[in-house]
Amino acid sequence: MTKLIPYGRQDINEADIQAVIDVLKSDFLTQGPAVPAFEVAVRDFVGAKHAIATSNATSALHLACLALGVGPGDIVWTSPITFVASANCAVYCGAKVDFVDVDLDSFNMSEQALRCKLEHARKARLLPKVLIPVHMGGQSCNMAAFYDLSKEYGFSIIEDASHAIGGRYQNQQVGSCQFSSITVFSFHPVKIITTGEGGMAITNDLGLAKKMQLLRSHGITREQSEMVSIPDGPWFYEQIDLGFNYRMTDIQAALGLSQMSRLHDFVIKRNSIAHRYEKLLKDVPVFLPKIAKDTYSAYHLYVIQLNLELISSSHKNVFNELRNAGIGVNLHYIPVYLQPYYQNLGFSKGYCPNAEKYYSRAISLPMFSSLTDEEQDWVVTQLIKAIQK
Ligand SMILES: *Cc1c(COP(=O)(O)O)cnc(C)c1O
């Protein structure tokens, strides 16, 4: 096998291509009917009231923070095992970021670490305004527990579900916002469904939805009820807040809508790949991802952790061997606070021991809907070979 097997990739069929072509031949490339159609499809799928499509998940996270009033003087907590965007969104708003350590079985924010940190934060008067748990690899965090804590300590929750559309928690779709104010999805090509670049914020709160819609498009309104003055004429609009251009195009939304019809199949395929890995790796000295009883993972990632005590090779060597064999393994993620930008804000090594332990031994194996059995067998054979070196 000479072709590189990536860790993740998009799955585009003829219907997806035709949907994009149709928009290109239509009157609207942006601000047309495809965006609301895509929003309705996702909103109805997850069982929530409002959906705001955005240019990417990073902009959706930024809008979510702004809608919840995050600003200078506020503190936002997230997980260290995530993409940097989960933390950056709070910094954009002028807030401080802090990190809650993860659980080594799920790689999600640890409920126990959260409880402990909240108790200390209450005494120090440093409680967060917003918590951003991340559904790492596609498995939902224990949201009911986080929700109870949010009531006890008075913070809001934004779910970073960039990995998790199509996943379920307590028999509800991730994104139902049963236990959060806002949920954010990403449609980057490595994620479960794609729009090229794209994201979406989901909420059941009309006020939050309106605020995010306003800020998505420059803070401009054309609704007379929201205006300060009487319209000069039919051309009139008012900028009533400082917003951005965080809009999704109709080209992207049409692709997203077409991909939505395939979401169910994608997630089933990802779960069957995961089960196959589980079988093939059961006697290999690696820790496999553990799925909690009341969750159904969308399996954006399949992360194994090397059992380094039983392996003579090092994490880096196993990783290199796999890359040399044409397998595009990856590592999700470097603990965010170890990035130079965050170290400059005062964080340093040792801050979240589980996150660092995870980082010292984790490898993301290829996981995408078009991965063949033959490719998967090759990945496993090469992994075993690399571990035995
Ligand atoms: C991909 C990702 C993002 C950012 O998504 P974009 O759509 O690329 O902006 C945010 N958080 C997590 C956990 C992600 O994996």
Image (spheres, rainbow, N blue to C red):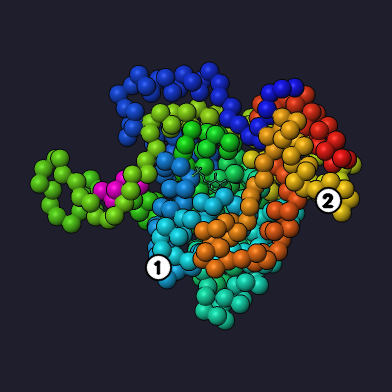
- Image position of 307 with respect to 321: above or below: below
Q: Is residue 271 left or right of residue 99?
A: right
User: Label 1 belongs to which residue?
Assistant: 72
Q: Where residue 143 appears, x then y in whole percent?
A: 61, 57
| Three-letter amino acid code at the position of disc 2 | Asn
Q: Which mark is residue 307?
A: 2
Q: Specify whether residue 217 is painted magenta.
A: yes
Quarter holding residue 168: top right
Q: Where residue 38 appears, x then y in whole percent?
A: 44, 34
What span is colored magenta in the figure? 216-220
**Residue at the (88%, 40%) spot, across then down:** 388
Q: Is residue 32 left or right of residue 370?
A: left
**Residue at the (68%, 34%) spot, across then down:** 328
- Image position of 212 with respect to 125: above or below: above
**Residue at the (78%, 42%) spot, across then down:** 318
Q: Is residue 192 visible?
A: yes
Quadrant in the picture for the N terminus: top right
